[in-house]
Amino acid sequence: MTFEETYLNDNILDALYDMHFEEMTPIQEKCIPEILDGRDLIGIAQTGTGKTAAYLLPILSMLDDGGYPKDAVNCIVMAPTRELAQQIDQAMQGFGYYLDGISSVAVYGGNDGSRFDIETRGLKMGADVVIATPGRLLSHIRMGHLDLSRLSFFVLDEADRMLDMGFSDDILSIAKMLPEEHQTVMFSATMPQKIQQLANTLLYNPVEVKIAVSKPAEKIQQSAYVCYEPQKLGIIRSLFKAGELERVIIFSGKKNKVKDITRELTRMNINCAAMHSDLTQAERDDVMYRFKAGQVGVLVATDIVARGIDIDDILCVINYDVPRDAEDYVHRIGRTARAQRDGVAITLVSDKDMRYFSDIERFLERDIQKNPLPDGLGEGPEYGRAMPCPHHKSSRGRGGHGRGGQGKPRQHGGDKQSGKRSKSRHHHRDSNTQ
């Protein structure tokens, strides 16, 4: 199905034409008509399916059609991380190129006071769309910088990640400030019970759209080392001594482990950098810039970059820890084998994580190759049976996009090059129009 076959307005279609977007992805085909019809919606779809466009395009189209207050925030898009907020803001600039008078501002934490002041000025000047992380948005609300009493659209992107990061109370606090009549759209990569409970709380008679999680690309060569936790750093050392590993992301679920791995690689004179929540926004931006530019060869990161960060030339992904969810495993290793390239994915499976890795294998419907441990590390546990960790002296390691939001509302507009297409559509939420 093409975008032309929807009721998206002419200005949106013109921008899509300029961007060479014609055919909709499955998530867009199922979501855009429902959102245009004013329905609450929950979408279950992984990164890379086009979900950002699935909610931004219909909302921007409706805002551009008019009937919404000019002196109010009309849409809030909430995202779990600064990086995702920046990417949504970038997409907003492209989709909104021909929209006269539709402004946006991105607000996210981890910056110095001057950034907060710039955001405050932007919010007070007025913005139709605010793209924000939960904590930063609450800070501005509590300081009286924006009023949500006339909001028309409330979007939660990567809701499961927000709950994992502890934003549940913030989300519910913000939701209590919204008017009774508004449209809520929620996207999540997974649908655990806690997401279902949140949907039941926030959404009214929602449409549920689920796009099956794709299996990892066939070009990804997957394997694993079954080991005890103290043997992991030894495996990392061996992997990097064995060959010239380049363009690598190492994922760990804990920032302290990220720091340990980075220290070990630095001792080995590996050109690496760490990415975790203790870094300031400026530091994180600098790390991502240097990694994307090839100035850093190995990125050691928490799941903050597992989703939504598009880097096409990653050759190897190493899971230092086994993800607790099979779909998270797919997201992680999906950073490699992009743009028709081959890729390698290696997972370190401790005795305590075997059951999670077994769940992943069942999800993938395949057994993943188990590699022998490098020489000198002793024996590992037998796969499929948890065992106490023996005291192996030899197994113990040492030591443990773009421009983004500019902080002021931008007017999206330009010369319209194409003629108007005749469209007719009704708004279901008439109580929101003024």
Image (spheres, rainbow, N blue to C red):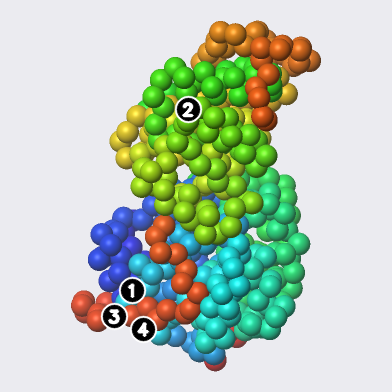
**Residue 345, label in figure:** 2
Residue drawn at point x = 33 percent, y = 63 percent: 3
Name the secondary structure under disc 3. Answer: loop
Q: Earlier in the sequence, mark 1 or mark 3?
A: 1
Amino acid identity at mark 1? Tyr
Query: How far apart, in angstroms, are the residues tagged by discs 1 and 3?
Result: 7 Å
> Mark 3 Cα within 10 Å, few/some/many (few <14, many 20+)?
few
- Across and down, in percent, residue 51 comes to 47, 56
Answer above or below: position of 349 versus 38: above
Task: Tell which of 391 and 421 is nearer to you.
Answer: 391
Which residue corresponds to mark 4?
Answer: 100
Name the front one of labels 4 and 2: 2
Query: How far apart, in angstroms, are the residues tagged by discs 4 and 3?
Result: 7 Å
Name the secondary structure under disc 1. Answer: loop
Query: How far apart, in angstroms, are the residues tagged by discs 3 and 2?
Result: 45 Å
Note whether residue 167 is visible: yes
**Residue 97, label in figure:** 1
Answer above or below: position of 259 versus 105: above
**Residue 191, label in figure:** none
Q: Earlier in the sequence, mark 1 or mark 2?
A: 1
Name the front one of labels 3 and 2: 2
Q: Earlier in the sequence, mark 4 or mark 3?
A: 4
Image-quadrant location for residue 99: bottom left
Query: How far apart, in angstroms, are the residues tagged by discs 1 and 2?
Result: 39 Å
Amino acid identity at mark 2? Ala
Query: How far apart, in angstroms, are the residues tagged by discs 4 and 2?
Result: 46 Å
